[in-house]
Image (cartoon, coloured by chain):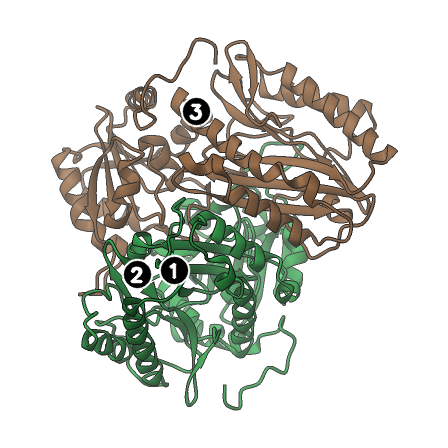
Chain colours: A green, B brown
Amino acid sequence: MGTRTLDVSVVIDPERRERVTAALIKHGIDAVICTSASAILLLTGYWPVVGASVAVVSAEGETHVIVPEDEVELAEQSSQAVLLPYKPSELARIITPIQALTKPLSSLTTRLGLSPAKIGIELDQGMQPASYVTSTDFRSSLPTLLRQILPNAAFVCCSEILERMKASKTIKELHMMRVAAQVAASGFATAADEIKAGRRETEVAAALHSAFQSSVQAESVQRSYGFFFCMSGPNSARAAAAYARTRQRKIEEGDLVMIHANTCADGYWTDITRTYSAGTSTDRHDAMGAAIAEARTAALDAIRPGAMAREVDGAARTVMTSHGFGDAFRHPTGHGVGFAAANGNALPRIHPQSPDFLELGMTFNIEPAAYVDGYGGMRHCDVVAVTSDGVEVLTEF
Amino acid sequence: MGTRTLDVSVVIDPERRERVTAALIKHGIDAVICTSASAILLLTGYWPVVGASVAVVSAEGETHVIVPEDEVELAEQSSQAVLLPYKPSELARIITPIQALTKPLSSLTTRLGLSPAKIGIELDQGMQPASYVTSTDFRSSLPTLLRQILPNAAFVCCSEILERMKASKTIKELHMMRVAAQVAASGFATAADEIKAGRRETEVAAALHSAFQSSVQAESVQRSYGFFFCMSGPNSARAAAAYARTRQRKIEEGDLVMIHANTCADGYWTDITRTYSAGTSTDRHDAMGAAIAEARTAALDAIRPGAMAREVDGAARTVMTSHGFGDAFRHPTGHGVGFAAANGNALPRIHPQSPDFLELGMTFNIEPAAYVDGYGGMRHCDVVAVTSDGVEVLTEF
């Protein structure tokens, strides 16, 4: 990343704090009040587990999180925000998180003088990566509560401001994404040995997930988990869908076998795909592989601060078309990655019609691919970051 | 389940259709329009993957789902709803799901004559199990869109109606939950062999997850995935928290080792815990185990249609207290399970202050436990169903 270096504890992120403050001031917003896990991670460094936390960040940079008491330890180790513990449930009475939040949220917003005020809340559609087995969905209950306790405040949607901020990572966040990529690599390291004719997709996916989950690289991470998918033969041709799916199919000699993973390290997500040949590679595999490798190089070469995202897509698409795989490359070349795992609308959109410009620190995937119905699909998906002089591939393995 | 038998394809669930229609008529609601994955599973049998689907169900029982075209295959295999495919994203233009939904949702609601009408939508706080790596969160965008396209409709919150319906399962849903429990068992089957002094919690969790994911029992399931957690020694004492967490700790001889799993089979979730001794059991382990086994039996004996949920909690709690573990049993005895994995507010709440009555077909967990700070925790968590003459334990292993 040129001359930018990480010289502070990973808990402290002054760069992010400055950006948040600047964005709120620019939009005339006095404070944002957020509940989505990825927004709280962005604003505070803490990635909520069950999603019952509320972050309140003022334009002066005062950062508070009302947090379930059993998540305080995790929050302390990842954030410098002022933590206000609460009990979302009790043995002495039946209570829901929104009921339990009323008093601490009312106290905090009063103390911060947020009425009258212009307050940003999340109203627009978004995507959330899984932060746990299950997570709290506040739906309209938080806006309703806020309007009750702050009747003189004006509420505006801050979703777009947050999404724009998520696109470019700070030095600390880039560090976390490199860690996430290193941990993810430990799953892929076993792939060539695990993929064999006769094995089921489920068995291969299980073996890679296991290697990932028990990796020593994860020792520096508090919460490391994710998903590995295996799609073989004709199933790999269906991987252009918006989701991956491992099935019971037995791998056959000569199959293309696609391994797709979304893994996270403390809330920072990766999006990685590699494709293997079961047994000996064929001429057809080689032709697809050559096109994809060349498209990848063309895309990487087009990445620099100030470039248009659609030029990057165009660079990859032109190569795929020249190799006869234009129609087989059915999706955009990439999308923002980091705070979201798989979200085609995350900025920057490396899409043929994208209006987005690339900026220093933006992270996204580059995923040239070819899907041939009934035969197989090949995709190579890396996570990359825009550097001052070009690009850093975070998943160079 | 007494004389209730499953004599139809699992795709067809006339019992659920009747209950939905009856609930809408009872509350004077003309239709419900839902986007949460667990609500769509309840209403249609289809468990959306990336959460960009919308179910529209009328009080006459007409059931439609507007579904991403790449999820049609999964929806067809699990639901009899009329499927209306749409493209949430395109290569030809930048578009978001809510934009892409506008036209099909407008056409469908017009065709169904839903303006003027009383329409139920999800507004209250809830919890959603992870349906994929990442999922769509519509936040306020869907209510806003609906008010635009149906200006003469009245919108009411249907969250509570849905939550009450989720509590009691139909014969088909109970069948799916038994399948889910059988698949989950394949992970636990390997636990006694995998838990050894010197192994890390991460390694044990990875091994059990792998056994689960590659289990042959999952062959009848389209989407089988979930989470296994391992917490050993002092870490097991912290398992009273609202979430489980696997750490890097190495298991020591004489540790209590708690294995917790939330797994799903096509959207139907389990919530299961077993506790093991690393090496030879100790007198202290035996004392905790005896109390928990007795509390479990007392709770199971109290389950029958018409019983109060708090009597079941009281039965378990009285036993734990009589063994000196009253204070160590820090959470309720259980909560609803099936459409949610781990949600303490899912009905019925087996909580000391619960107003809930048990009904035929209700499924929940029974999880007596003792947590001793700094030493260890023991929990035995089963999923059970209320039968006409008592209880069925779905996780009898």
Number of marks drawn: 3
Q: Secondary structure at mark 1?
A: strand
* Residues at discs 2 and 1 in contact (Cβ within 8 Å): yes
For residue B175, which numbered disc appears in the image?
Answer: 3
Extreme residue in the right direction: B283
* Residue at 73% over, 55% down: B249
* Residue at 38% over, 50% down: A245
Q: Secondary structure at mark 3?
A: helix
Left or right of residue B383, residue A137 in this image: left
The percent coordinates of residue B233 (x first, y second) are 77, 46
- Depicted A46 relative to depicted A89: above or below: below
Residue ID for mark 2: A377
The three-letter code of the residue at mark 3 reads His
Q: Is residue A389 visible?
A: yes
Q: Secondary structure at mark 2?
A: strand
For residue B159, which numbered disc appears in the image?
Answer: none
